[in-house]
C-alpha cells in the first residue's frame, strides 16, 4: 500500500496584533486550523458577514511594495510575510481572520509567525497533499527583472538582487527548501527600504506604519537600525521570503526550482499567471513517502485537485 505525504494544518489558534506597515493602523490577525483541501482563506471579521478572500493569484489586486488581495468588496493588504510563514512551515490549510484591511507587520519578517506555528504545532490531516510539479521552464519578466520555474526534484529558490547602493550591492543566494531550513535561514529576514525613498512612499500613502522596529532602513552611509543587520545578506534572504509567500498564491505547493533576478511582487504575479496559462508545462502529483525518482510521484487529474488548487 502506498503512503502519501499528507496535508497539515495548525494544532491550535495563533493570535497576533500590531501596526500595519502601509496604513499605520492598529490591526490584528487570528490564524485558525483549516479543513483539508481548503488552502489559505482570509476572513475580514470587522466587516458585516465576515466575507472571505481566498489566498489566490486570481484575487491579487495590488503588488506595489506588497501583495494585496481583494474579493467581493473585501481586501487584505501585505499578506506575503504571513503566507510565507505558513507555506514555509508546511501548513497547507488555515483560516486567517483579520480585523482590518492589512496584516500586522510585526518585526518586518516572518519569524513571529513561524514561532507561532512552532508553539501550536502541526496536525496531519487524512487527505494526501497535492503538489504542482514543473515539467518545462516557465518564465516571466520585464524591465530587466525576471523570474523562472524549472524542473527539479524538490522545491528550491535562488535569488539575485542588484542595487547601486554600496551597503546592499549585488547579493545572491540558493536556498534548498525544508520547513526546518526556512525557520533557520529565511524567516528572520526583515523587509527593507532606503531612507531617500521614505518621504516619497509616505506622500503616496505607503509605509505610514514603518519604523526601525519593523523594517531595515538603509541610510546614505549606514544601516540606521541600532542593532544593524541580522546577517550580511539579510536583503536577499528577505526577497526569498517574499517570493515563497507570493508563490503560495498558486494554491498548491510546487516541486520545482524558482529563480528570481531583481524580481518583486509584480514579477511573481506575472510568473504565476504564466503557470496558469501553460498547463502543459506542469502536472499535479501526490508524493509517496520514501519513494525515489519518478516512482515517488503519482500523477492526478487536475479536477481531482480541487478545491485546494482553486487557482488552477
Image (cartoon, helix red, strand yellow):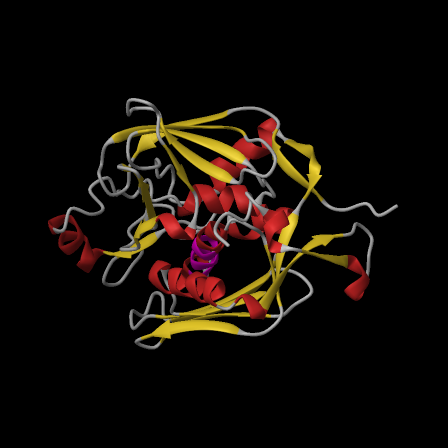
- Picture coordinates of residue 15 (x, y %)? 45, 25
Count of numbered circles on the image: 0
On screen, residue 177 above or below 38: below
Q: Residue furthest bottom?
A: 144
Q: Position of residue 60 (x, y in %)?
A: 35, 50
Residue 76, by quadrant, is top left
Q: Residue furthest right?
A: 1
Residue range in magenta is 236-243
* Residue in view at x 28 percent, y 22 percent: 48
Where does the image place residue 106, in percent across and percent down from the top left? 38, 36
Q: Nearer the viewer, residue 29 or 68?
A: 68
Name the residue located 35 percent from the left edge and 25 percent from the top edge: 50
Relative to 178, say whether 142 is above or below. below
Up the image or down, 194 lies above or below 53; here it is below
- In front of the other: 51 or 179: 51
Q: Main secondary structure of the magenta part?
A: helix
Image spot of residue 291 (x, y percent): 82, 56
Residue 18 visible, this angle? yes
Residue under the point 64% across and 37% down: 8
- Residue 242 colored in magenta in the image: yes
Query: Is 264 left, or right, of 176 in this rendering?
Result: left
Amino acid at each position: 500500500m502506498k503512503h502519501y505525504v499528507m496535508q497539515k494544518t495548525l494544532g491550535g489558534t495563533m493570535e497576533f496584533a500590531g501596526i500595519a506597515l502601509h496604513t499605520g493602523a492598529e490591526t490584528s490577525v487570528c490564524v485558525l486550523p483549516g479543513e483539508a483541501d481548503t488552502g489559505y482563506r482570509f476572513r475580514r471579521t470587522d466587516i458585516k458577514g465576515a466575507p472571505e478572500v481566498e489566498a489566490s493569484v486570481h484575487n491579487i489586486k495590488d503588488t506595489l511594495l506588497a501583495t494585496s488581495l481583494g474579493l467581493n468588496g473585501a481586501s487584505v493588504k501585505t499578506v506575503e510575510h504571513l503566507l510565507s510563514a505558513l507555506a514555509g512551515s508546511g501548513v497547507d490549510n488555515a483560516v486567517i481572520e483579520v480585523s482590518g484591511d492589512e496584516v500586522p507587520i510585526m518585526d518586518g519578517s516572518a519569524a513571529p509567525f513561524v514561532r507561532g506555528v512552532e508553539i501550536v504545532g502541526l496536525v496531519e490531516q487524512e487527505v494526501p497533499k497535492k503538489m504542482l510539479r514543473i515539467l518545462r521552464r516557465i518564465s516571466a519578466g520585464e524591465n530587466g527583472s525576471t523570474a523562472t520555474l524549472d524542473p527539479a526534484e524538490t522545491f528550491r529558490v535562488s535569488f539575485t538582487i542588484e542595487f547601486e547602493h554600496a551597503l546592499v550591492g549585488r547579493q545572491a543566494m540558493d536556498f534548498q527548501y525544508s520547513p526546518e531550513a526556512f525557520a533557520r535561514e529565511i524567516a528572520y529576514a526583515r523587509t527593507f527600504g532606503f531612507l531617500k525613498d521614505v518621504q516619497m512612499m509616505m506622500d503616496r500613502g505607503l509605509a505610514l506604519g514603518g519604523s526601525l522596529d519593523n523594517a531595515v532602513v538603509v541610510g546614505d552611509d549606514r544601516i540606521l537600525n541600532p542593532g544593524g543587520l541580522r546577517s550580511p545578506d539579510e536583503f536577499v534572504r528577505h526577497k526569498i521570503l517574499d517570493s515563497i509567500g507570493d508563490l503560495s498564491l498558486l494554491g498548491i505547493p510546487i516541486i520545482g526550482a524558482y529563480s528570481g533576478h531583481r524580481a518583486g511582487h509584480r514579477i511573481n504575479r506575472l510568473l504565476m499567471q504564466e503557470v496558469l496559462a501553460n498547463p502543459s508545462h506542469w502536472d499535479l502529483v501526490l508524493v509517496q513517502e520514501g519513494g525515489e525518482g519518478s516512482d515517488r510521484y503519482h500523477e492526478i487529474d487536475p479536477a481531482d485537485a480541487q478545491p485546494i488548487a482553486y487557482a488552477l
